[in-house]
Image (cartoon, rainbow, N blue to C red):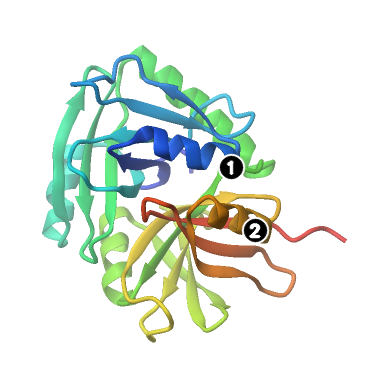
Amino acid sequence: MSFMSPGQVVWFEIGTTTPEAVTDFYGPLLGWTFEVDPDSSVDGRTYTRILAPGAPWPMGAIQQGDTGDEAINLSILSTDVHADVDALTDLGATVVVPATPVGDVTVFARLQDPRGNLFSLFSQSTSQRFEERIAGTEEYLQQAAFTPKPGSMAGFEIGTTDVKATTDFYTQGFGWRFEKAGADGDVPSLAVFGPDAASPSGLLRDHSGGNGSTADYAMPIFLVTDVAATAAAAQEAGARVEQQPRSAPAGPARARIRDPRGNRFGLLSQPTAR
């Protein structure tokens, strides 16, 4: 199983009308740097790639839009975006942006799952430029899996008030599987495995018990050295800490944040070795 196998979450996007506000918040908080795609400008709107500290390849992007909506979404690799859009709509997804070619680089689409969470699909291209980018990204992801660095994407989390509807959709749509992962406080959790994956890449949290969350969400999680300190810095910069930092015995510390634009993201730090 490759890190860049179809059905895997391999990217994230932040949609905004004001990219500068996004870079001003996340840059100092997580040490991110940014590079504008020179081919992306349409009517003054840009696509800005996001790089974690020390990373040679981007892990996500800022999509400047004109809808007035602020959003964050996970991106899933597809072998055929057009076919996947048809299959996913049959499973209850809603098309937000139909399958759209981007030059000779890729094809993408943006959808909402049956619980209202945004996600996007993109397909690999046969162009040499894209193949070089994918090869470099996969090499970086393989290295990051063994030596993750602060500021990098460390997985994803889906929160739901209907576990069956959510797991059915992603299992049927992408071949994901879900295994019990215990509970974080009073919130039961399931580990999320991509197609044929030996290790989990995400977490599903069951909020059906009315334990402090009234809406479904899907968000990227970022690795930091100190969750409590980073959450406090985010709050000082205008964010809201939705889930206060907490950790399981000998387990990772986690927090859930809503940035100044209202988008959710997670923080994760690994326990210190003794």
Task: Residue at 51%, 41% (x, y): give it.
Answer: 26
Look at label 2 and name its amino acid. Val
Q: Quadrant of the C terminus?
A: bottom right
Dot 1 falls on a residue whose secondary structure is: helix
* Residue 221 marker: none
User: Callout 1: few (<14), some (14-19), or many (20+) C-alpha neighbours within 10 Å?
Assistant: some
Q: Report the residue that reaches farthest toward the bottom.
A: 209
Q: Is residue 218 above or below residue 26?
A: below
Q: Nearer the viewer, residue 129 or 14?
A: 14
Asked whether, in this view, residue 144 is left or right of residue 35, the answer is: right
Asked whether, in this view, residue 102 is left or right of residue 189, the answer is: left
Residue 65, percent across and down?
23, 36
Identify residue for label 2: 227
Residue 243, percent across and down?
52, 69
Identify residue for label 1: 30
Dot 2 falls on a residue whose secondary structure is: helix
Q: Is residue 41 above or below residue 96?
A: above
Res. 257 in view: yes
Residue 83, percent across and down?
15, 42
Task: Residue at 29%, 36% (x, y): give it.
Answer: 122
Q: In the picture, residue 268 is in which quadrant?
A: bottom right
Residue 154, percent across and down?
56, 49
Please report whichever mark, 2 or 1, sits nearer to the chain's N-terminal start. 1
Q: Is residue 177 above or below residue 160?
A: above
Q: In the picture, residue 124 is in which quadrant?
A: top left
Q: Is residue 164 above or below residue 41?
A: below
Look at label 1 and name its amino acid. Leu
Q: Nearer the viewer, residue 189 or 200?
A: 189
Q: Nearer the viewer, residue 220 or 19?
A: 19
